[in-house]
Structures are given as C-alpha cells and as structure tokens.
C-alpha cells in the first residue's frame, strides 16, 4: 500500500474528479483500483492530496507530449525509460517501455535498455541520449564534455534542454514513486539482514578478532 493516504472520489476536488473520470470511469479508484495500463492507479489518488501538486505534475505530462516539442519522441522515450531503470523505479521503467514501443522502438531495443552500452541496436543519436541520461540520473548531472559533444552532433541546444528537463522531471517521478511506494514500486527493499543459520557468523566474528600472537 502507498505510504500516504489516498483521496477517494467523494473527497476529490473538481479538477481531480475530472482526472478520476477519465482514468477510472465511474469507479472510486481507492475502493476499486486499476488503470487500463495495468497499474493500480494510486499515483493519482496520492497526488490528489495536494490538488495543485497534481495539476503541476499533469502539466509536465502535457509539456512533453506537446506538438511544440522539438525533441524526437523516440529519443524522449529512450531517456524516460532509461531513467526509470537507472533510478530503480519499476513504475517509470515499465510504463515507458510500453511508450517506447508506441513511438516505434523495437522489442530488441526495449529489451536492451538495461545494457544499452554493450548493445548494437541503437544508433549514434540514441546512444548519446542514453549516455546523457545516465549522467543526469546516475551521476547527478556530472556530464563530461564528450557526452555533450556527442549530443550536439545530433540535437540542437533547444532539443538538449528539452531532453534535460524531461529526464530530470522523470527522475523526480521515479524517486517519488519509490519513496511513497506508489504503483509498481510498492515493494520491500531487498537489502536487509538475512538469517544467520546455525550461528556461523558468530564463529567467523570470533576468528576475525584473533590476533597473530593468539590473544584476542
């Protein structure tokens, strides 16, 4: 379950109610969750806690899908999907794998997103976008000049700015989704102490404490 309260239909503000109707029909998305894409839909019901935050986020969706964008949708979706994988958000990664196919990327390319740097199915522009995405997400924006030069061989400054804005926006969505356990990111952290069967770790600890002279 999400870590924050979800807003039921009868508590939604008017604009949120419109979004609920578009996504969930006549259902209350808290009592009867589920979207057409297969996700629970609780990103919407949690963001509805702060209606202007929901509107602001939806404005970001409108921005990247606008016909005014100069950036090729194929390159945009590569950046968004890779962001999800790099940040470890199953929700962002899964949703944008689907979107990658919608804009014309092949199943081979989608499958290669986790290991793009050793894959041969991406062209030079796509590889530059993937490398830049990793700089933004995995390196916190630390970007070598060579990566920018590779981008500029294929993209205008305006396109690079659009890509930067969209990728970092989706990094925020990925982080938020994981932190609040939204949608497909409602999973336990796999990094935890495991059972010490038969007390073997305690024995190893004693061995580590022994000194060369036999003292402890």
Image: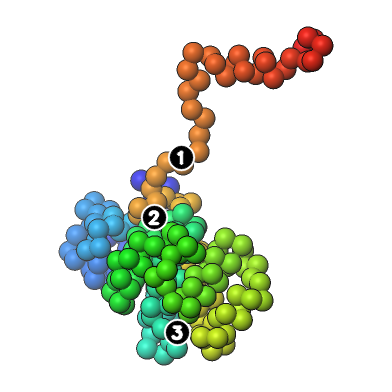
Q: Residue at x 47, y 67 (%)?
A: 170
Label 2 sits on a secondary structure element that is helix
Q: Residue at x 80, y 10 (%)?
A: 215
Q: Where is residue 18, by image quadrant?
A: bottom left
List the residue tagged with mark 3: 71
Label 1 sits on a secondary structure element that is loop
Relative vertical location of residue 109 with respect to residue 215 in this rendering, above or below: below
Please tell me whether mark 3 sits on a helix, a strand or a loop: loop
* Left or right position of 152 against 212: left
Q: Is residue 175 left or right of residue 186?
A: right
Task: State how far apart marks 1 and 2 are (Cα).
Answer: 14 Å
Dot 2 crowding, Cα within 10 Å, few <14, some 14–19, many 20+: many
Q: Label 3 vs label 2: CA separation?
A: 25 Å
Determine whether, in the image, residue 148 is placed left or right of residue 64.
right
Q: Residue 139's quadrant in the figure? A: bottom right
The x and y percentages for residue 88 are: 46, 54
User: What residue is rendered at 45% in x and 88% in y?
Assistant: 70
For mark 1, does the 10 Å Cα neighbourhood hold few (<14), some (14 to 19), or many (20 or more) residues? Answer: few
Observer-nearest residue: 33 or 82?
82
Task: Find residue 90 and name its label.
Answer: 2
Q: Which residue is mark 1?
A: 190
Spatial CA distance of label 3 from label 1 is 37 Å
Residue 40 spot, x, y in % from top left: 28, 55
* Mark before the other along the chain sequence, 3 or 1: 3
Relative vertical location of residue 213 with respect to residue 126 in this rendering, above or below? above
Relative image position of residue 194 (x, y in whole percent): 48, 27
Circle nearer the N terminus (3, 2):
3
State whether residue 203 is above or below residue 193.
above
Is the C terminus in the top left, top right, bottom left or bottom right quadrant? top right
Residue 56 shows up from this direction: no
| Location of residue 203 by image quarter | top right
Is 67 placed above or below 89 here? below
């Amino acid at each position: 379950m999400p870590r924050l309260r979800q807003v039921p239909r009868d508590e939604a503000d008017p604009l949120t109610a419109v979004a609920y109707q578009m996504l969930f029909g006549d259902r209350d998305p808290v009592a009867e969750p589920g979207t057409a894409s297969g996700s629970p839909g609780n990103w919407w019901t949690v963001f509805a806690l702060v209606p202007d935050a929901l509107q602001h986020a939806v404005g970001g969706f409108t921005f990247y899908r606008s016909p005014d964008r100069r950036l090729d949708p194929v390159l945009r979706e590569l950046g968004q999907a890779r962001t999800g994988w790099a940040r470890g958000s199953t929700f962002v990664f899964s949703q944008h794998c689907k979107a990658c196919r919608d804009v014309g990327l092949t199943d081979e390319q989608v499958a290669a997103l986790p290991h793009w740097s050793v894959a041969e199915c991406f062209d030079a522009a796509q590889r530059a976008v993937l490398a830049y995405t990793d700089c933004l997400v995995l390196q916190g924006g630390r970007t070598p000049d060579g990566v920018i030069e590779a981008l500029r061989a294929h993209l205008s400054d305006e396109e690079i700015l659009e890509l930067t804005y969209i990728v970092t926006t989706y990094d925020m969505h990925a982080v938020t989704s994981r932190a609040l356990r939204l949608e497909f990111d409602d999973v336990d952290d796999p990094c935890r102490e495991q059972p010490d069967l038969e007390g073997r770790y305690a024995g190893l600890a004693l061995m580590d404490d022994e000194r060369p002279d036999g003292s402890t």
